[in-house]
């Protein structure tokens, strides 16, 4: 027996001991991670039992939770195994044995963990583990330190590859293994030329592409405000017909989008709040359903689903979204560990962590490009049908930051402006994808925001102190309990909280036609609504829907094709959503918002989706504010108690306003006509 054969059992025993040592080290590291996780999320974990009692957590969520735990454990075990293999190969290459081999293994393990922690701080500065390492290494120094550790890792891996190749070439099957490795690398590196894509759209049946941007207030675009810089959207709007006074009927994502797809007011479709139940929605009358019957393929894509339950029932052939349901709140929020963070925005991460990949609410790991990659396979394909594509980008939604945002997190205006600039880049890349996939050869493109955003800026509510008019009193009225930030009479916060906060309801709306001949370009003043999109599309496509199809909006097609130049005056109704006190601020505490609103919701036992309880509908209705915009006038009603709603009349041109409908100012306005229209529409809700 040779000396080599004598050494093998000893080496095998040594390697087993080495693996056990690394396993123990990894186990203790996981304990430290979990301990820090619990400490960092203590308030949320404490509240979980309270929340679970209120909404009765369905058992269907637990398989995904167990899968998540298993994935995290497996990822750490893989790291342990990877370090073990590196240690064995390096020891063989450098002829290191016994104690020095163990020291090398421990050093390599710590090198990998420290590099992962520093990479996490650099790439994901809003991760809780970044807060931990930031105590030791400030952000100013993290990049050079991370780069130094990364280069050492590259050197270690290079030596490992040399050791591996040495073993391969010393193997009796070295020739065969070398051929297989060469074939593998050729397959990875050399990519075949993509086949040309064929699109199914024509001049008669063009693609319909609706691009929504969450919380985008138009005055933060360069097109509306020269102090702002959004180069791509500005260029796009300069080639479009832009409706400068577009509003949403309800400034929350779910009611706004269901109104877009139905062409109906929230009251008529029955979606009066985020996560409202959809038992009475006539899905067969939705825009995608009608287009589907006329030969269209239909796709809906968004990077945020927590408060919007749009699904296949609206006749979408395909949904491109993060998973929907209670686990989105749980697993998306709590998946913040260095090793998994570094994988999340990869193809492997998409498979391992579906609740985090391309999921906007998981702001500490969200990369805007991941949402584009999520959509790419569905768009980059041959089509025999025209496409109806509705896409909603949620980057400008609170908290206005994303994975690698490096600005001042305490400055709300700076964060919001940065998110608008970033979504401008994201949409530019999206249009590049649309061009590559031939979807813009023949297309009607509609760019919109589902609602705006009030940032407690002066003028965010249209009631200026000096323009108040009431001969009986000089005391300014109280609209609702003051916000957490003690806002002034001309300030407002959030969206869907305040109908006189017109920056919440003012939306972007623009139409651009591709390959369909001439159309009008420029700005059109006059109040229009997102409800108008559905009938406009029908007219542009020369579709004649059945007469029983109820549509509250009006067509803007005549303005787009140049047959009409002015927008006729009509009554446009607005309403608010239920708004907990914690949301009346530009600094909403997510935990407080959830706890204040948790009584509203229940979890579906089969799907784990959150919906508003039937028992809470009446309370939501009682809390609503209502408004009518008619020409240069706006009349709003604010609930003061169960029996009284305070009227507020505003002249949108002069800014004068009053809460006295018996005043001379009110009598010289269409206030009574507007009040009558509101009562006719909302019925008993306004009595």
Image (cartoon, rainbow, N blue to C red):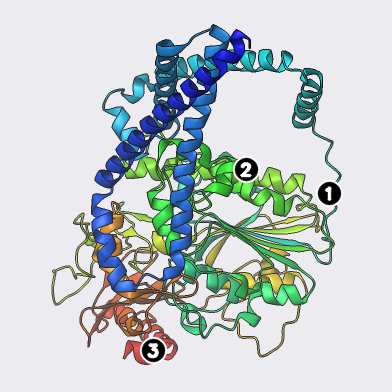
Residue 347: name its quadrant. Answer: top right
Circle 2 residues within 10 Å: few <14, some 14–19, many ≥20: some
Residue 55 at x, y = what percent?
A: 33, 72
Q: Nearer the viewer, residue 575 or 189?
A: 189
Q: Nearer the viewer, residue 546 or 679?
A: 546
Residue 133: name its quadrant. Answer: top left
Residue 425 falls left or right of residue 24: right
Q: Which residue is mark 3?
A: 679
Q: Which residue is mark 2?
A: 428
Residue 520 at x, y = what percent?
A: 70, 58
Residue 509 at x, y = what percent?
A: 57, 60
Residue 54 falls left or right of residue 6: left
Residue 44: which numbered mark, if any? none
Question: Which quarter of the image is occupied by the C terminus?
Answer: bottom left
Ranked by sequence position, the earlier of labels 3 and 1 is: 1
* Cα–Cα gap, marks 2 and 3: 44 Å
Q: Compared with residue 483, is residue 432 higher up or lower down, i.e. above or below? A: above
Q: Nearer the viewer, residue 359 or 238?
A: 359
**Foreground: disc 3 or disc 1:** 1
Residue drawn at (37%, 72%), measured in percent from left and top? 576
């Amino acid at each position: 027996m040779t000396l080599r054969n004598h050494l093998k059992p000893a080496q095998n025993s040594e390697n087993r001991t080495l693996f056990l040592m690394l396993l123990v080290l990894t186990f203790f590291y996981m304990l430290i991670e979990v301990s820090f996780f619990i400490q960092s999320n203590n308030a949320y974990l404490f509240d979980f039992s309270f929340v679970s009692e209120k909404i009765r957590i369905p058992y269907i969520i637990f398989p995904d939770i167990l899968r998540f735990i298993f994935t995290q454990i497996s990822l750490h075990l893989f790291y342990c195994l990877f370090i073990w293999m590196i240690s064995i190969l390096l020891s063989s290459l450098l002829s290191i044995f016994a104690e020095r081999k163990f020291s090398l293994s421990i050093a390599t393990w710590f090198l990998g963990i420290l590099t992962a922690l520093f990479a996490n701080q650099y790439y994901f500065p809003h991760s809780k583990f970044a807060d931990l390492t930031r105590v030791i290494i400030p952000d100013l120094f993290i990049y050079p330190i991370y780069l130094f550790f990364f280069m050492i890792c590259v050197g270690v891996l290079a030596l490992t590859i040399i050791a591996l190749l040495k073993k391969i070439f010393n193997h009796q099957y070295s020739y065969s293994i070398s051929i297989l490795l060469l074939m593998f690398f050729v397959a990875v590196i050399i990519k075949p030329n993509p086949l040309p894509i064929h699109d199914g759209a024509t001049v008669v049946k063009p693609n319909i592409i609706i691009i929504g941007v969450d919380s985008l207030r138009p005055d933060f675009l360069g097109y509306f405000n020269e102090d702002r810089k959004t180069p791509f959207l500005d260029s796009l709007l300069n080639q479009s017909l832009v409706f400068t006074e577009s509003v949403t009927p309800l400034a929350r994502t779910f009611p706004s989008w269901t109104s877009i797809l139905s062409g109906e007011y929230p009251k008529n479709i029955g979606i009066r709040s985020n996560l409202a139940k959809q038992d009475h929605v006539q899905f067969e009358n939705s825009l995608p359903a009608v287009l589907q019957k006329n030969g269209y393929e239909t796709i809906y894509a968004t990077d945020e689903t927590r408060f919007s339950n749009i699904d296949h029932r609206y006749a979408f052939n395909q949904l491109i979204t993060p998973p929907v349901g209670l686990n989105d709140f749980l697993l998306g929020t709590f998946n913040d560990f260095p090793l998994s963070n570094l994988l999340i925005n990869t193809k492997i991460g998409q498979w391992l962590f579906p609740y985090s990949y391309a999921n906007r609410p998981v702001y500490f790991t969200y990369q805007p490009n991941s949402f584009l990659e999520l959509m790419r396979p569905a768009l980059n394909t041959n089509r025999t049908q025209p496409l109806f594509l509705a896409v909603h980008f949620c980057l400008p939604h609170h908290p206005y930051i994303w994975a690698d945002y490096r600005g001042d997190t305490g400055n709300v205006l700076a964060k919001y402006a940065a998110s608008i600039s970033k979504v401008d880049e994201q949409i530019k890349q999206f249009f590049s994808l649309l061009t590559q996939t031939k979807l813009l050869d023949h297309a009607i493109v509609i760019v919109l925001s589902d609602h705006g955003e009030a940032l407690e800026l002066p003028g965010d509510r249209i009631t200026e102190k000096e323009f108040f008019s009431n001969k009986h009193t000089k005391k300014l009225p109280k609209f609702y309990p003051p916000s957490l930030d003690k806002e002034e009479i001309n300030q407002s916060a959030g969206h869907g909280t305040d109908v006189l906060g017109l920056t919440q309801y003012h939306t972007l709306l623009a139409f651009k036609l591709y390959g369909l001949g001439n159309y009008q370009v420029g700005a059109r003043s006059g109040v229009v609504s997102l409800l108008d999109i559905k009938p406009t599309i029908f007219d542009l496509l020369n579709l004649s829907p059945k007469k029983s199809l109820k549509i509250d909006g009006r067509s803007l097609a005549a303005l787009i094709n140049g047959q009409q130049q002015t927008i006729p005056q009509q009554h446009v109704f607005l309403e608010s959503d239920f708004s907990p006190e914690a949301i009346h601020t530009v600094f909403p505490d997510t935990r407080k918002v959830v706890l204040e609103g948790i009584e509203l919701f229940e979890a579906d036992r089969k799907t784990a989706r959150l919906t508003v309880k039937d028992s809470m509908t009446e309370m939501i209705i009682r809390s609503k504010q209502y408004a009518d915009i008619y020409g240069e006038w706006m009349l709003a009603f604010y609930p003061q108690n169960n029996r009284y709603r305070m009227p507020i009349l505003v002249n949108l041109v002069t800014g004068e306003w009053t809460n006295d409908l018996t005043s001379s100012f009110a009598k010289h306005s269409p206030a009574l006509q507007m009040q009558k229209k509101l009562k006719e529409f909302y019925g008993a809700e306004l009595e």
